[in-house]
Image (cartoon, rainbow, N blue to C red):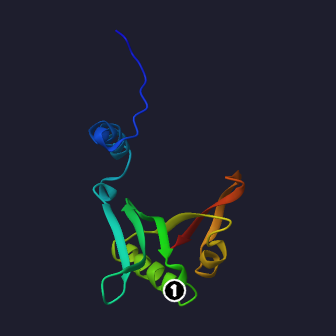
């Protein structure tokens, strides 16, 4: 038997990517309590103008007993107007409705560390020299 490695980063191989992902999820499910199984939901909140133009949003997922925010973005011309806090608050409210216990996210030192600290998030870890910046891992209990 020959075993070999491939590095396939194109979209045409999404079946193989989902194989790995789905098997990891199946393994994880064996170790979580029954009341947390099946608790997965994508969160895609968008901030739009009346004409439909997207000005920002939150992209994340509820997984078991937490919400993980992958991206929070507000168009530069609309920053400092409270929209980021409103988006974050709406995402947190969805998490509370889904009985999540905490929210986790990460940010780089040039992004929004102070913003998240003002919103009640705490740093629980960091990596120095991540792209020559500091990468912060943050959490907020709900």
| Frontmost residue, 99 versus 95 | 95
In the drawing, does residue 112 fall left or right of residue 104?
A: right
Question: Is residue 35 toward the left or the right of residue 77 in the image?
Answer: left
Q: Nearer the viewer, residue 5 or 23?
A: 5
Q: Which residue is mark 1?
A: 78
Q: Quadrant of the N terminus?
A: top left
Residue 84: x %, y % from top left: 51, 81
135 relative position to 14: left or right: right
Q: Is residue 29 visible?
A: yes
In the image, 72 versus 137, the foreground residue is 72
Question: Quadrant of residue 136 in the image?
Answer: bottom right
Q: Position of residue 90 (x, y in %)?
A: 41, 81
Residue at the image position 54 percent from the left and 90 percent from the top: 81
Query: What residue is shown at x 39% (from left), y 35% (from top)?
Result: 8
Q: Tell me if residue 142 can be seen.
A: no
- Tell me if residue 82 comes above or below residue 102 in the rendering: below
* Picture residue at 59% right of the left edge, 73% below the top: 121
Could you say which is closer to the camera, residue 22 or residue 80?
Answer: 80
Label 1: few (<14), some or many (≥20) within 10 Å?
few
Relative horizontal placement of residue 134, taking residue 85 as reference (left or right)? right
Q: Position of residue 110 (x, y in %)?
A: 67, 67
Check disc 1 and report its element: helix, strand or loop: helix
Q: Residue at x 26, y 39 (%)?
A: 15
Q: Position of residue 103 (x, y in %)?
A: 49, 68
52 relative to 128, above or below: below
């Amino acid at each position: 038997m020959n075993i070999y490695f491939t590095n396939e980063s194109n979209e045409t191989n999404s079946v193989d990517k989902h194989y790995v992902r789905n098997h990891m999820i199946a393994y994880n499910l064996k170790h979580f309590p029954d009341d947390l199984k099946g608790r997965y939901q994508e969160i895609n909140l968008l901030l739009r103008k009346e004409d439909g133009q997207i000005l920002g949003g939150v992209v994340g997922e509820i997984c078991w007993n937490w919400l993980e925010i992958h991206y929070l973005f507000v168009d530069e011309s609309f920053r400092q107007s409270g929209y980021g806090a409103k988006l974050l608050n709406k995402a947190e409210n969805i998490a509370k409705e889904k009985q999540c216990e905490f929210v986790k996210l990460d940010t780089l030192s040039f992004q929004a560390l102070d913003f998240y600290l003002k919103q009640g998030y705490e740093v629980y870890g960091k990596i120095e020299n991540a792209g020559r910046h500091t990468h912060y891992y943050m959490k907020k209990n709900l």
